[in-house]
């Protein structure tokens, strides 16, 4: 009932800023629906390539001194093999990931994450943050192992695209929005 797209990318740099993704995704969804009519959910499993760089370099990362000290453990290559440490880091990193997607911006007001810009700009909804979904060396270095799901709902693609294109609004599922509320020091209005 679910089709999961992995590693959708905009491969031609010269086509940057031109939204072919929505058309292509709609086309693929329609074709899949014809071939497999029981499919009703279309979602991605996507990397978060800029998260760790933002976490280490941005001045607007909303963490306490205690949390910043805890985050120093991310420099240990095998931190995720320690269950207690992993639980502590998860409690800090998942809300920070929600902040990263919903609030953090470049100096020009754009989302930091290029993958998020692609999917959200094409009408997807940020559906879920997946803890330790990819523990490869590259994913740990770029995203602390986080991956996300973007949901493509044909009934809301246009509305979501317009919200993102016109108001820079990230349409996100309630579970992602609730994560940001854990960070009590942040005005989420």
Image (cartoon, grey):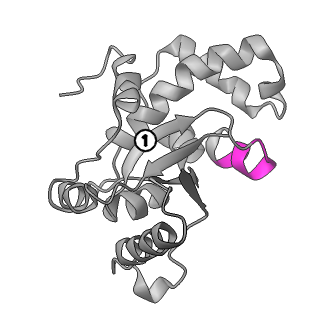
Q: State the residue lying farthest toward the front.
A: 37
Rendered image quadrant of residue 14 = bottom left
Image point (17%, 28%), residue name: 189
| Residue 71 located within the stretch drawn in magenta | no
67 up-or-down from 111: above or below: above
Residue at image mark 1? 127
x, y (%) of residue 128?
48, 38
x, y (%) of residue 111?
36, 53
Q: Badge 1 local density, few (<14 within 10 Å), some, or many (20+)? A: many
For the question of whether residue 167 can be seen, the reply is yes
How would you classify the magenta stretch by its main secondary structure? Answer: helix
On screen, residue 59 versus residue 84, left or right, reads left
164 up-or-down from 175: above or below: below
3 up-or-down from 81: above or below: below
Secondary structure beneath dot 1 equals strand
On screen, residue 189 versus residue 144, left or right, reads left
On screen, residue 177 versus residue 188, left or right, reads right
Image point (39%, 16%), residue name: 182
Q: How many discs appear?
A: 1
Rendered image quadrant of residue 185 = top left
| Residues rendered magenta in the picture | 135-142
For the question of whether residue 59 can be seen, the reply is no
Q: State the residue lying farthest toward the bottom.
A: 14
Q: Nearer the viewer, residue 93 or 127?
A: 127
Q: Nearer the viewer, residue 137 or 10?
A: 10
x, y (%) of residue 85?
73, 15
Q: Nearer the viewer, residue 129 or 99?
A: 129
Image point (72%, 42%), residue name: 140
């Amino acid at each position: 009932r679910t089709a999961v797209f992995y590693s959708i990318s905009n491969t031609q740099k010269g086509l940057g800023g031109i939204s072919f993704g929505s058309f292509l995704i709609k086309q693929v969804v329609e074709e899949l629906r014809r071939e497999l009519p029981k499919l009703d959910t279309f979602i991605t499993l996507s990397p978060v390539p800029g998260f760790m760089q933002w976490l280490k370099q941005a001045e607007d990362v909303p963490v306490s001194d205690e949390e910043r000290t805890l985050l120093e453990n991310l420099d240990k290559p095998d931190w995720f093999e320690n269950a207690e440490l992993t639980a502590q880091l998860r409690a800090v990193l998942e809300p920070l990931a929600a902040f990263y997607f919903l609030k953090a911006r470049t100096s020009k007001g754009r989302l930091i994450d290029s993958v998020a810009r692609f999917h959200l700009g094409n009408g997807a909804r940020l559906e879920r943050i997946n803890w330790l979904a990819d523990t490869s060396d590259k994913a740990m270095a770029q995203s602390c192992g986080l991956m996300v799901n973007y949901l493509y709902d044909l009934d809301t693609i246009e509305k979501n695209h317009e919200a993102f294109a016109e108001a820079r609004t990230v349409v996100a599922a309630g579970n992602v929005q609730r994560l940001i509320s854990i960070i009590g020091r942040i005005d989420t209005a």
